[in-house]
Amino acid sequence: MPQRPSPPPSIAIFAIIGGLLIIAGGIVVTTSSAARWTLVGAGVAFGVVAAYVILLGKANHRQERRIVELERGITSVEATHAGLRNRMVSTLREPLTDIVAYAERLINHPTLETPERIGMLEEIRNSAREVEQFLADLAEQPEDLMAHANSHHLVLLDHEARSVIAAAPKGTQYSSELEKARAWADSAKVRQIMRTVLNAARAAECHQVTLKTGERSSKAIVTISAHGQLLPIEGIAALTGNTESGDSNSATYIALRDAHAMAADMGGTIGYTEVFGMSHVVIELERAGEDIADPTQDAHEEKVVSPVLPREGFTAAVDLRPERPTASIRFS
């Protein structure tokens, strides 16, 4: 944002006072009445001009502040627009592709076995809900989003991870170690977060990714890992806070920043670390108890939960800022 220097008001006022004192001194020391009246007229004229300059300076200062506020608003709108476009591409494209692909297979293979047909219909339903959640987020105002931030239901993270892997684009090899993991969350947002991380891994040209799910203490966890660097440097910045001014223009940065916000809306966390040559993105959500009914039995049933105080977990331990050279030093 360009800076607009303006003359300091104190200097202008000091100059005006000095000018008036000089004119007043001339009036006092002059002996000619004609010269004295001339100086009086000059003093009056100088005072009028000085008042005009002061008023003009104040008006100019108000306009400059208004321009700065408008420029900040434009910058905010541009950032929001860029995030919206990026999220529409990363969030809507894959679920809609899944819906079309499964629908075409159902049409072209009418003799499919019932279990396989049911599985495809479930995938179509899940993808449609993901799109529905995104459209609902667009329609809601910020205060509405906060009011519904704690309206979650039971999510089977292992099922969601398996579904995302099955629908992921080719070109990357996926392996999984999916243990039972039950979380209080929003299934559409969980799928969006996992899709975003996998898309970022493809952008970093990561050719082999491992997904793990499990439970630890009060947390249900999804871990996405790879040998070497899993995310581009802009993606790492979005999850660690080690950002630079140019990162905000990166689609990967915007997508992972939104994923971080979605995890926070669900009362969870998402962090990045590297250990022994392996890089990991760890998603932690509030674990659901064993007495909660399976969502596949009644997919429309939701339970509103009260805010949960943060407990110790992986991302709390590393404080989202892993101590490693590549996180603290940026190379261009």
Image (cartoon, grey):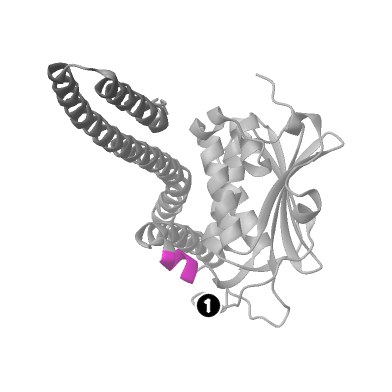
Q: Which SS does the magenta portion mostly show? A: helix
Any part of residue 228 in sight: yes
- In the image, is residue 107 part of the stretch drawn in magenta? no
What residue is shown at x 40% (from left), y 27% (from top)?
A: 11
Q: Extreme right residue here?
A: 276
61 to the left or right of 306? left
Q: What residue type is disc 1 on?
A: Glu
> Which quadrant would residue 142 be assigned to in this image?
bottom left
93 to the left or right of 317? left
Provide the residue span drawn in magenta: 143-147
Q: Extreme front residue here?
A: 31
325 to the left or right of 13? right
Give the x, y percent position of residue 163.
59, 55
Q: Extreme left residue here?
A: 34
> Which quadrant would residue 268 be assigned to in this image?
bottom right
What residue is shown at x 18% (from left), y 26% (from top)?
A: 40
Return the residue nearer the eye: 318 or 106: 318
Q: In this view, does 255 lie above or below 156?
A: above
